Image (cartoon, grey):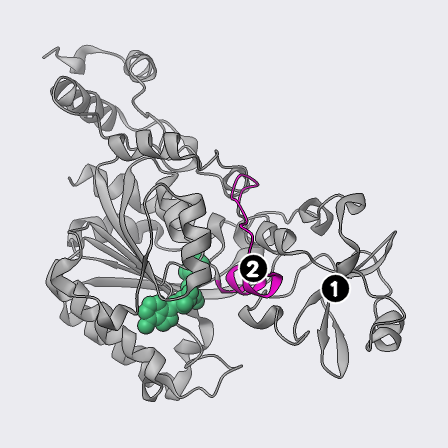
Amino acid sequence: MADLKNNTEDELIEISKQNNICYLGVNKKPYKKTTLIKNIREYLSKKDSEPVASPASQASQASQASQASSASSASQASQASQASLRMIDLFAGTGAFSLAFQSTNAVSIVYANDMCQSSKTIYDENFSHKLTLKNLNDVNIEDLPGHDILTGGFPCQPFSIAGKQEGFADERSNVFWKILAIISYHKPRCVILENVKNILSHDNGDTFKVIVSNLEKEGYHICYKVLNTADITGIPQHRERIYIVCLKDKNVFNKFNKFNLDFPKVDKKRTTCFLEQEDTIPSKYYYTDKSSTWNLVKSSVVKKDTIYQYRRVYVRENKSNECPTLTANMGSGGHNVPIILTDSGVRKLTPRECFNFQGFPLSYKLPNLCDSNLYKLAGNAVSVPVVNLIANRIIPLLLLED
Ligand SMILES: C[S@@+](CC[C@H](N)C(=O)[O-])C[C@H]1O[C@@H](n2cnc3c(N)ncnc32)[C@H](O)[C@@H]1O
């Protein structure tokens, strides 16, 4: 094998380019010389036997993530053949975790699960592999494929301020123990969990202590932070969610912890950048004088740069140029529906606009589901660019320690 040590960094980058080996790390900066050499060597050694592992993080910038490349089956298949890290996506919903991790080109999704039919419909429409439709509690742990990464935005209603806050007493949160059992059996190198920020203070902080201590007992090093989509992605949606990153390897954790989950603030784009063209919006999204809430909506929704929320008996005005937190119950009963004033009148955000405010690329397909299901999927999802930031920070470290 050629002694690459004598090559300059520019030459190594050139070799990488020519062989389609990724040479860019987080923030699109070229890797260090040692990493460039390692990747090229890896490529050369695998070239004749199997496809190369590519530590690409090409969709690294959050704003670019929303323009991420098409999720066509063909390109996914070729990405999967290059990927070296295996991931399972639990409570997959829309597959936002899958989408973000897959866009690093270093990860292939080997299993996705959800028990909701609309999740299966949207997931299968957008990914080459199929989601397993099953209650996770009924899944045989031994049947799950081995994996390096486990992601899971586990049900948040038991901890949410909007719910009864019964925490672990609520049947839906029992899945945490199932996640733990899966982790204990398969020992993934990296686990990423997501939930509402209220989980931190639930039961005076005891719920969160239970979560962290049980993950630590499984041998994980933990880092967590509440991240707001509006602060770090350029997308003007106020969405504060806790992300819990668990790493098995102390070295990887130490490297990760130099930056941990701190991401720089990014200027927000205008909310209008996330709206569909007005002349394409079907009339069903507009309020008219036939709407039962017309008088309230008409008198309250008065500014064009503001997104409002209908709250049963009043309309709430949000901070200018910011979309309120999209929620799972947006579609049902008119509660929490974001409303805007445009040149054509007062209307709800469309499902596509809600997916835009979650950073899904336009290539992400919305299947023929009823609006309430689409709103629910969008409101339940993680913001894709937030997960992109996390994935682009972790993946190069996991690849280096391979
Ligand atoms: C907060 S959402 C996660 C959304 C997902 N992270 C995304 O980005 O779209 C929780 C999901 O867990 C699913 N779920 C809840 N309990 C489950 C269980 N016991 N087994 C499988 N899926 C479950 C729900 O159907 C829902 O799609």
Three-letter residue code for mark 2: Leu
- State the mark number for residue 374: 2
Three-letter residue code for mark 1: Ile
Tell me where residue 86 appears, x and y as whole percent.
Answer: 22, 45
Q: Is residue 271 above or below residue 161?
A: above
Q: Secondary structure at mark 1?
A: strand
Name the quadrant of the C terminus.
Answer: top left
Quadrant field for ligand 1: bottom left
Which range is magenta? 361-380
Front-most of residues 93 and 197: 93
**Contact? badges 2 and 1 (CB < 8 Å):** no
Tell me where residue 89 appears, x and y as whole percent.
Answer: 31, 55
Front-most of residues 265 and 236: 236
Q: Is residue 6 magenta?
A: no
How dense is the environment of label 1, judged by Cα within 10 Å: few (below 14), some, or many (20 and up)?
many
Name the quadrant of the N terminus.
Answer: top left
Q: Is residue 262 visible?
A: no
Q: Is residue 16 visible?
A: yes
Q: Is residue 329 above or below residue 31?
A: below
Question: Which quadrant holds residue 47?
Answer: top left
- State the mark number for residue 358: none
Residue annotated with mark 1: 339
Residue 355 located left or right of residue 193: right
Of marks 2 and 1, the one in the foreground = 2
Q: Is residue 362 magenta?
A: yes
How dense is the environment of label 2, judged by Cα within 10 Å: few (below 14), some, or many (20 and up)?
many
Residue depicted at 34% across the width and 16% down the height:
17
